[in-house]
Image (tube, rainbow, N blue to C red):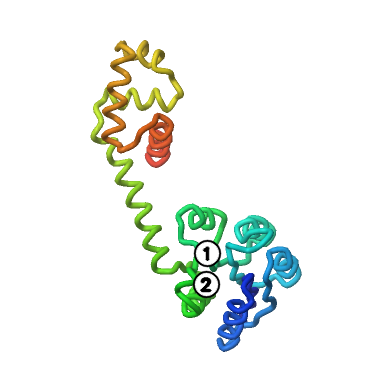
Amino acid sequence: MPRLVIVEDHADIREEVVRAVRRLPGWTIVGAHGTGESAMQCIAAERPDIVILDIGLPGVSGLDCLVRLKFENPGVVFAMFTIYDDDDKLFLALRLGASGYVIKDEGLSGIIRALRELEKGRAYMSPSIATKVVQSFWRENVELGKFQELTNRQLQIVRLVSEGRSYREISAEINISEGGVRQHLHRIYGVLHINNRHRLAAMYQELMRKMGPPE
C-alpha cells in the first residue's frame, strides 16, 4: 500500500490532489503540507514511499527540499508538481533525483498517471516535458556533431582553447600569427553557431567526455 506526502502551497490545489488520491484504491496519504519546512519534518517521521513536491514553495523552495530530502531519504520517490516548464528548473530537478515532473496544466489526471507509473518503479514526465528532454538530447548531439565539419588545424586550435591557452600561446604552438588564430576561431564559431571561447571550450570538453578515454 503506497504511502504518499503532498507538498503544495496553494490550499485549494492541495485539497483537490488529496481528494483525487483518496479515490485511488490502496493509497494512503500520510501528510499534506503547504511549506517545505513542515513537509521535511513529516517526511523524516513518516518515511513515505512517494512525495508530490511543488517547486514554487514559499521559504524553502521545492528544489531546496529535494536536495536535502533525497540525500536523507534515498529510497523515497519524488515527483515535482509545478507551473514551471523552463529548462533550467526541469533539468536541475532531474539531476537532483526527481523521478517525475508533472506540469500543473496537465491537471489531476497528470498526478494520477504519475502516481501509477511511480508505483511501478517507473519515471513519469508530462508529455510537454518529455518532448523537451528529447529535444535537448537531439540539440546536444547536433551541436557536437558539427565538430566533424572542422579541419584538423581548427580542431587543434579548439583543443588548445579548451586548455586555456592564450592567442599568443596558440600562435606559437601551431606556428601561425595571432591574427590567423583569430580568423580560425571566427570560422569555428560560425560552424558551431557560438560566439565565445568559453562556450567553445565547454562544447569540446563535453565531446571528449562523450567519446571517453582513448583505448
First-in-chain label (2 vs 1): 1
Q: Which residue is drawn at 57% across and 89% down?
A: 23
Check disc 2 and give the amino acid type: Leu
How crowded pointer 1 is (Cα within 10 Å; few <14, some 14-19, many 20+) is rated as: many
Write down the quadrant of residue 67 in the picture: bottom right
Distance of label 2 from label 1 (alpha carbons)? 8 Å
Quadrant in which the C terminus appears: top left
Q: Which residue is drawn at 69% across and 78% down?
A: 30
Q: Is 117 situated above or below 146? A: below
Residue 165 x/y as whole percent? 43, 20
Check disc 1 and give the amino acid type: Ser
Q: Residue at x 38, y 53 (%)?
A: 136
Q: Is 20 situated above or below 179? A: below
On the picture, is 104 further left or further right than 33? left
Q: Is 114 situated above or below 169? A: below
Tell which of 126 and 98 is nearer to you: 126
Residue 64 x/y as whole percent? 64, 56
Quadrant in which the N terminus appears: bottom right
Residue 36 x/y as whole percent? 68, 64
Q: Is mark 1 on a helix, strand or loop?
A: loop
Q: What residue would you read off at disc 1?
A: 99
Residue 51 x/y as whole percent? 61, 70
Marking on residue 118 = 2
Give yes or no for contact between labels 2 and 1 (Cβ–Cβ under 8 Å): yes
Tell which of 106 and 22 is nearer to you: 106
Marking on residue 53 = none
